[in-house]
Image (tube, helix red, strand yellow):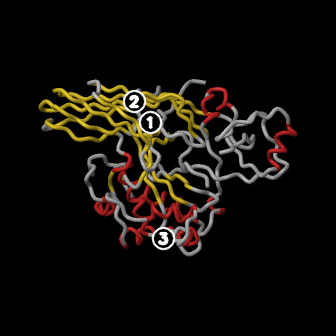
Amino acid sequence: MPDGGRTGTPNPSSGTKLQLGAYLPDRVFLIFSEQQAQTVLSAKTSFHTNPAFLERNPRIFQRHPLIFSNPSLPSSLVRYHIIHRTTYTYESPVTVGHYTARLEPRALPFQECPWHEITIRPIPMQRAERADSFGNTCVYFEIEGSHQKLEVIARSLVEVARGESISPSSTPAWETVRDACRADRATASSLAGELAFASQLIPIGSVFADYARPSFPAHRPILEAVCDLNRRIHEDFIFDPAATDFATPVEQVLKKRRGVCQDFAQVMIACLRSLGLPTRYVSGYLETLPPPGQVKLVGADASHAWVSVYCGETAGWMDADPTNNILPSDRHITVAWGRDFGDVSPLRGVTIGAGEQRLQVAVDVLPEAD
């Protein structure tokens, strides 16, 4: 099943011409002739992306399913240098702090992170890395000793390919997807169904289903319906950073129709789950473009949030960004996903001491010049 939220599995005809060279997620075969490429294709191998990944990412040979280059897909990659700086300043000294950071961009069929590092000041007494239940990379660290400031700087090099576009009208009816996710046997759809329920921060209920229902008439293709709901939230809600905070309930956001990207994503998730459709909360970065003729400002980017909806076993998970009314592509960089913001918080922890605290976050997403 395709994963990662932006591409489905291509189904090319036997006459499709392949580029010479191949990116293969579990292992790599280098194709040196058209005949070899067609031999692989005749084995019904799925494929996408492009060989440029191979040139810059030799470690990918050991990492990822069998995927081949297809010239019908975009061959260009966008390479980003990302700096995410988080600073906590405490009113009174902190003697002990235990923290978890989720700041490393995920490895996905359309995205690679060849290099990543986290710098922490003060230097932690202990530090360990693990994957959580959603596959996000977590860095746990402990700081002991009196301090009144914590600084965490994550630096990443990320390469993003524009995924294959899927026609919304080609996806199955939303009721078909919903019913498949409720199956009483283990399938890709029933496993995805685990994300069709309420979570700690995102409830489900009739108020959300009623808002979503105009976009979901009977038998409408699921991605077509998702795109319409995405558009409506973008048009009905006002971006207002002063209207909400982390603790603002989703019901209140729906009522006020104001908030930020986190709020809009969680409203959309509540709507879709209230209809029985599996949806996950996605955190990451969005490259923002300057006005025409102006230079991009350092610090103009920010952490961002959007959603990923399960659209059946063929299309898999598809991303949607209600804040901008788009289906994410190569300007969105995925860091983590989960049930809600609580599963993907970039940095969270507990301290002894601190009193009042002030948080400052600065993010730079800088595309590499051609």
Say which of 282 and 62 sits in front: 62
Mark sitting on residue 154: 2
User: Within 10 angstroms of label 2, few (less than 14), some, or many (20 or more) residues?
Assistant: some
Q: Quadrant of the C terminus?
A: top right
Q: Secondary structure at mark 1?
A: loop
The amino acid sitting under disc 1 is Glu
Q: Is residue 366 visible?
A: no
Q: Where's residue 14, x and y in %?
A: 84, 51
From what the image shows, is residue 37 above or below residue 125?
below
Q: Where's residue 16, x and y in %?
A: 81, 46
From what the image shows, is residue 96 above or below residue 223?
above
* Sequence order check, earlier mark of 3 and 2: 2
Residue at coordinates 30% horizontally, 46% vertically from top-left? 241
| Label 2 close to label 1 by CB (< 8 Å) | yes
Q: Quadrant of the N terminus?
A: bottom right
Tell me where residue 218 sits by quadrant. Answer: bottom right
Tell me where residue 253 sits by quadrant. Answer: bottom left
The amino acid sitting under disc 3 is Pro
Say which of 80 and 352 sits in front: 352
Residue at coordinates 45% horizontally, 50% vertically from top-left? 134
* Sequence order check, earlier mark of 1 and 3: 1
Q: Kindly identify which residue carries mark 3.
A: 214
The amino acid sitting under disc 2 is Ala
Q: Kindly identify which residue carries mark 1.
A: 104
Say which of 35 and 293 sits in front: 35
User: Within 10 angstroms of label 1, few (less than 14), some, or many (20 or more) residues?
Assistant: many
Q: Secondary structure at mark 2?
A: strand
Q: Where's residue 116, x and y in %?
A: 46, 29
Q: CA distance from mark 3 to mark 2?
A: 42 Å
| Label 3 close to label 2 by CB (< 8 Å) | no
